[in-house]
Image: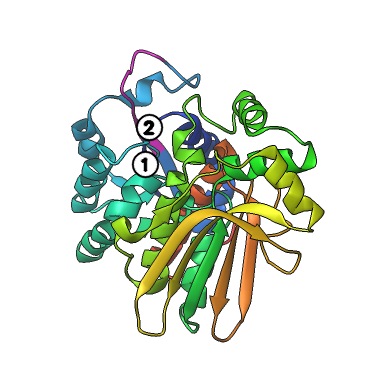
Amino acid sequence: MATIKAAILGFGTVGQGIYHILNEKREELKNKLGIELEVAKILVTDASRERVPGTAHLMTTSMEEVLAESGMQVVFEAIVNEEPAYSYLKRAVEHKCHVITANKVMFAKRGLELQDLAKANGVFVGFEATTAGGVPVIKTMKNILLVNDVSRIQGVLNGTCNYILTKMRAEGWSFDTALKEAQSLGYAEADPYNDISGQDAFKKLMILSALAFGEQPDWADVDVIGIDSISASQVREACEKGLRYRHVAEVEKLTNGKIVAKVGPQLVDKEHPLYPVDDVFNAVALETNYIGTLTLVGPGAGMYPTASVMVEDYAEIIGKRAGFVVTI
């Protein structure tokens, strides 16, 4: 049986999740794919600290060492910022490695470029985990776009914002109280700026725009508004009217071909597809010409939801190379 080697770049929450799933699913993946997968390298900034027992011998601080490993064919990337993530993946693609990323900051800006480079090198890019965590938005859109045109996308793309707005409505909490609870539960970072400002949802929306329309609007033209100015009294008044606040990321292709987008709080009624989406769940509503409106809902973040879709990307990529379809 053939063996292929994989590397994991970044070994925080998501990187560790990938490692655990690959080990737990090792036999199942081997039986379905006919290929043995071996995690051969784990790239970290400090190789002296063993995060997961039994991984010390796999850790390195050198991307050169990762790419020098004989038989390296797949790179999972779970680094936070644009760099050095993009440079690492560019080198991996040029080394004829398939790459799978969860990095929305990098992919929103460099995704189209990375995909073009991968195509030129005969490898694949998996990016399901960049948007909406465990919700299979990317693969669903890819399938839909084979026949349908998508005219508009609306999404709840940040679980932290959705959790805060849910608690403000259901519990009557203030914004600050809800934020502190989100932080204590691990839903929000110590510095929650990217979440509550709308920047996280904006980056995910740009990835969806590139996939749906082949382009993005000029980033400078997109209004991005957070949720920190919404008061408990505003939420209560909306609730009394049968409305709910949702932090909505929206992109649309107008009849003249122009792509327009916005991110910010919206009031939605019971008829709106995003109305029932509570807590840390994400949702994406796609308006299409043949299907109509399709809404996908699921967990938006976390070790296993994000890591699992990255492993699914791996199975799909290897399945394509082998000429068959794999479901796990």
**Image coordinates for residue 153, horizontal then vertical, percent:** 51, 68
In depth, the one of 124 and 278 nearer the eye is 278
Tell whether label 2 touches label 1 (CB within 8 Å): yes
Residue ID at (24%, 36%): 84
Q: Vertically, is 39 above or below 238?
A: above
Of residues 224 and 51, the one nearer the viewer is 224
69 is higher (above) or lower (below) than 141: above
Residue 127, above or below 174: below
Q: Looking at the image, which residue is at 63% across and 31% down?
A: 182
Q: Position of residue 145 (x, y in %)?
A: 46, 77
In front: 42, or 136? 136
- From the viewer's perspective, tell me whether residue 9 is left or right of residue 155: left
Residue at 68% from the left image edge and 45% from the top image edge = 234
State which region is magenta.
Answer: 39-49
Question: Which of the 4 image quarters holds residue 80?
Answer: top left
State how many labels appear: 2
Q: Identify the mark nearer the N-term, 1 or 2.
A: 2
Residue at image mark 2: 10
Q: Amino acid at mark 2?
A: Gly
